[in-house]
Image (cartoon, rainbow, N blue to C red):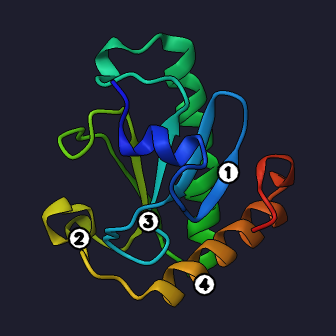
Amino acid sequence: MSSVFSQIIKGELPAHVIWREDDVIAFLTIAPLRPGHALVVPRQEIDLWTEAEPELLNGLMAVAQAVGRAQRRAWGAPRAGLAIAGFEIPHLHVHVTPIWDMSDLDLTNVDHEPNQSALADSAGRLRAALRELGYGMAVPTG
């Protein structure tokens, strides 16, 4: 089950990667709800989160928590929202986005044509916030 996420993980497609480690990668979505909307993805090709091993889910949630902390810091958001839907791409992924109210988690409101320089800026802000929070070991340089 190779997906577009598998291609991103292998470096075959470009992405604004904000976290990279052995089992998990995080990058900005190309269809954000808000600036900073990231996807936390296992390197392992697995479709349904309900089929994932608990250790893998624990790793995904730890990275999602770090990304959420960075989003709150970078955008001053009162909360970081988290969602697992799985309809778009058949590869487990966790949506993490800064939110101000429940409507910020409505995945039908994504921006399908985001400004590319705004995405690059958001990635830079998230990487900087992750480093400030002590997660620099997993944050790529660019």
Mark 2: amino acid = Val
In this rendered view, identify the residue nearer to me: 3 or 77: 3
Residue at 24 percent across and 38 percent down: it is 86
Helix, strand, or loop for circle 4? helix
Residue occupied by mark 4: 121
Instruction: Report the residue marked by disc 3.
Output: 37
**Spot occupied by residue 22 in the image (x, y as percentages of width and height):** 72, 29
Lower position in the chain sequence, tag 3 or tag 2: 3
Residue at the (30%, 17%) spot, across then down: 50
Classify mark 3: residues with Cα within 10 Å, few (<14), some (14-19) or many (20+): many
Counting residues from the N terminus, which is met first, the one under dot 3 or under dot 4?
A: 3
In the figure, 83 relative to 15: above or below? Answer: above
Contact, CB < 8 Å: mark 3 with mark 2?
Answer: yes
Q: Are marks 1 and 2 in contact (CB under 8 Å)?
A: no
Which badge, 2 or 4, comes first in the chain's sequence? 2
- Contact, CB < 8 Å: mark 3 with mark 4? no
> Does residue 61 lie above or below 8 as drawn?
above
Classify mark 2: residues with Cα within 10 Å, few (<14), some (14-19) or many (20+): some
State the residue position of label 1.
19
Q: At x 54% / y 61%, what residue is drawn?
A: 15
Q: Report the quarter where the C terminus lies.
A: bottom right
